[in-house]
Amino acid sequence: MTQCVQGMLYLSVLVAFAACDAPPVPLDDILIEKTFVPEQCVRAVKVGDYVRYHYNGMFPDGKKFDSSYDRGSTYNVFVGKKQLIAGMDKALVGMCVNQRSLVKIPPQLAYGKQGYGDIIPADSILHFDVLLLDVWNPEDGVQIKTYHTPSNCSRKVEVSDYIRYHYNGTLLDGTLFDSSHTRMRTYDTYVGIGWLIAGMDQGLLGMCVGERRIITMPPSLGYGENGDGSDIPGQASLVFDVVLLDLHNPRDGIAVTNQMVPESCTRKSVAGDFVRYHYNGSLLDGTFFDSSYSRNRTYDTYVGRGYVIAGMDEGLIGVCIGERRTVTIPPHLGYGEEGTGSKIPGSAVLVFDVHIIDFHNPSDNAVVNVTHKPEECEKKTKKGDFVKYHYNASLMDGSSIDSTYNYGKTYNVVLGANQVVPGMEVGLMDMCVGEKRHLVIPPHLGYGERGVLDEVPGSAVLVFDIELVEMEDGLPEGYMFIWNDDVSNDLFTEMDKDQNKEVEPSEVRDDLPQHLGHLQTFFLPVCSCPLITNVPHPLPFWLPQFTDYIMKQVNEGKGRLAPGFDPYRIIDNMFSNQDRDGDGKITEAEFKLKADEDVSHDEL
């Protein structure tokens, strides 16, 4: 019994000793220790897959016998096709990209009793520190994962489209090999016609502008067995993180969308019209590049004459005043392959959100529409008449310019005296007191290309709603004074009170205001819109005999001066015309009535 117990104790010691000296792996299978597992397993290896991995090969004592790192190249091989030692073939199945494992392989699953030359002795247990970098299968095609889709997708990429996109290119393990972002320039190319590697040609089809997707492709659809010779190794899967910024086709024309047409549209623009419009300009992905609003000034141009890019020339034809529209312009109708060199890249599709403020044609006349006509109309305005009227002035988009109602006074002018813009002259002719009109005045009959600083934009069409309040008959053309009664046969003698055969300055008159009588000077209220340019003529410090006589005839109703002007300016002009030698006095030989003149003068 004692001998039996001692035998059992001895056996247990041998087992314990054997356990302490046991080989690092079981003699019948491999042992895998996962030293790093990625959070996401992009793809796990299956039998028949092709893999790229790095490794360090060691004996159990840590002595290295081989390393892919030392050769500077991954080990690339099919799995499960007996191209590896049996233990490695088995260990790689199920590994994820970027997973790192310590694989311990017994001799019978490695190089067995034969070993491997002088490098690996017979019956060697092998340790491999493996990092899996890539896996693909000959049956793989392009894999697409869209992670952002824009809410609006009016068009998708098709074969032969030209696109602009940004990308980050990585290997399957995440190693970056290229990026358009780092170059700060999009990659621009045709799709589906062989300008790209096959996988990208396929992966870009069907994308929307603004869409983001990840395109993964096997080497057979990428750079194949040889890679690109620098950053992309042979037999590498490629991953492209792509955002599409732009697309068009060489056959594209402009596209007009988002039209908001006013209810009333009496006229549409045609080639040769001059258009004033506001716009916001952006690229197809929404990147802003220009705006007339930021300059607080419309863009003014002729359309259909090549003054703007071809697409805008076309997009501004057929618009209504007040219309809003979006004009999408392909690059061959925009700034082409070169772009503008700064804000607009080459081959960029342009998007303009346009608001039409007004337009006109150089052949346009003033448009006069009668909105109210009194039942009785004894006389109508004509050239030379002095008229008083109210007006509201605005631009075609309704922006107010000025109004006489704001000042509580009428606007007073002499028709035909160049005191208002030509279009207003037209609008005030043949008008009755109490009549109301709506005038549309093109800029060449208004304030022209320059406009009025801070009041009327250059090349602006003007809109006036006018009402004639009062009118006074003017004199016949060429006359500044007419006689109401028969003309005296001896006018010169009547004026020459001192009988010295000369009409010249006399003493100051104390009763000047009475001599003015009803002849008040008519000056307009101060108005920011300068429809008239005449200014008051200062009273002379002396009153000539000539002036005294004319004023007396007017006050007694025997004669009449042209209305709407400074009477002293008129009389001074009359005196100057009679003073033919300019010596400051009129002689009997110089004095003539208008009817006696050979040449027209604004005088008696």
Image (cartoon, helix red, strand yellow):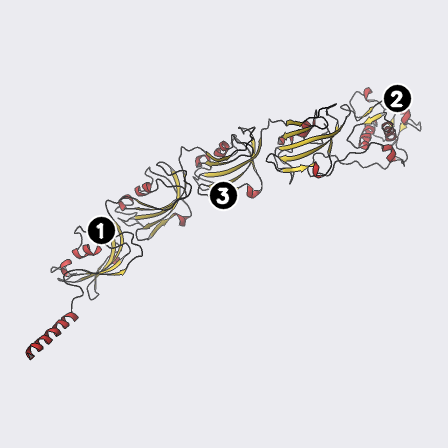
Q: Left or right: 262 with respect to 220?
A: right
The residue where tag 1 is placed is 46
Q: Left or right: 313 with respect to 600?
A: left
Residue 204 place in picture, x, y as percent: 35, 42
First-in-chain label (2 vs 3): 3
Residue 278 place in picture, x, y as percent: 55, 38
Residue 17 place in picture, x, y as percent: 14, 72
Q: Left or right: 407 with respect to 54?
A: right
Q: Amino acid under label 1?
A: Lys
Q: Tell me the CA gap for discs 2 and 3.
A: 79 Å
Above or below residue 366? Residue 190 is below
The residue where tag 3 is placed is 289
Q: Tell me the CA gap for discs 1 and 3.
A: 51 Å
Q: How would you rate the neighbour count of disc 2 (Cα within 10 Å): few for under 14, some for 14-19, many for 20 or more?
A: few
Quarter of the image with the N terminus is bottom left
Single out the residue that lies furthest toward the right. Answer: 498
Single out the residue that lies furthest toward the front. Answer: 375
SS at mark 3? strand
Single out the residue that lies furthest toward the bottom. Answer: 2
Q: How would you rate the neighbour count of disc 3 (Cα within 10 Å): few for under 14, some for 14-19, many for 20 or more?
A: some
SS at mark 1? loop
* Label annotation for residue 488: 2
Q: Amino acid under label 3?
A: Phe
Above or below residue 593? Residue 195 is below
